[in-house]
Image: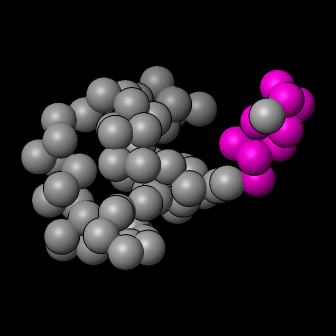
Amino acid sequence: MRQEAKVEIVLANPFLSFKQAIEYLGNIPESTLREWTSTRKVTSYRPGKQVRYRKSDLDEFMERHVKRSYESILK
């Protein structure tokens, strides 16, 4: 497979694996992502036995749970 084709496949697939989601969220502990998944705090998808996460869903989750600094609140 040509390099260009590989890049297109990766860009076309908006889903992240469990390990990729951990890295994307800042290398959080595996147990944390498992808990968030089981309590449905984070939206996940299960094509077969694999758990997948959409990057856009993880972005929304992070936006909802961002802690603002005192300085940003004053602005």
Q: Is residue 60 left or right of residue 69?
A: right
Q: Residue at x 11, y 46 (%)?
A: 31
Q: Quadrant of the C terminus?
A: top right
The number of discs equals 0
Q: Is residue 11 left or right of residue 2?
A: left
| Quarter of the image where one finds residue 37 | bottom left
Location of residue 65 in the rendering, given as x and y in whole percent from the top left corner: 37, 51
In this view, the residue in front, 75 or 32, is: 32
In this view, the residue in front, 24 or 8, is: 8
Q: Residue at x 44, y 73 (%)?
A: 47
| Quarter of the image where one finds residue 19 | top left
In this view, the residue in front, 10 or 74, is: 10
Q: Quadrant of the N terminus?
A: top right
Residue 33 visible in the displayed image? yes
Image height of 17 relative to 49, above or below: above
Location of residue 59 in the rendering, given as x and y in whole percent from the top left corner: 54, 50
Q: Residue at x 64, y 55 (%)?
A: 14
Look at the magenta stretch and give its main secondary structure.
helix
Image height of 13 relative to 29, above or below: below
**Residue 63 part of the magenta-drawn span:** no
Location of residue 5 in the rendering, given as x and y in whole percent from the top left corner: 85, 38
Q: Which residues are magenta?
A: 2-12
In this view, the residue in front, 64 or 34, is: 34
Location of residue 69 in the rendering, given as x and y in whole percent from the top left corner: 40, 29
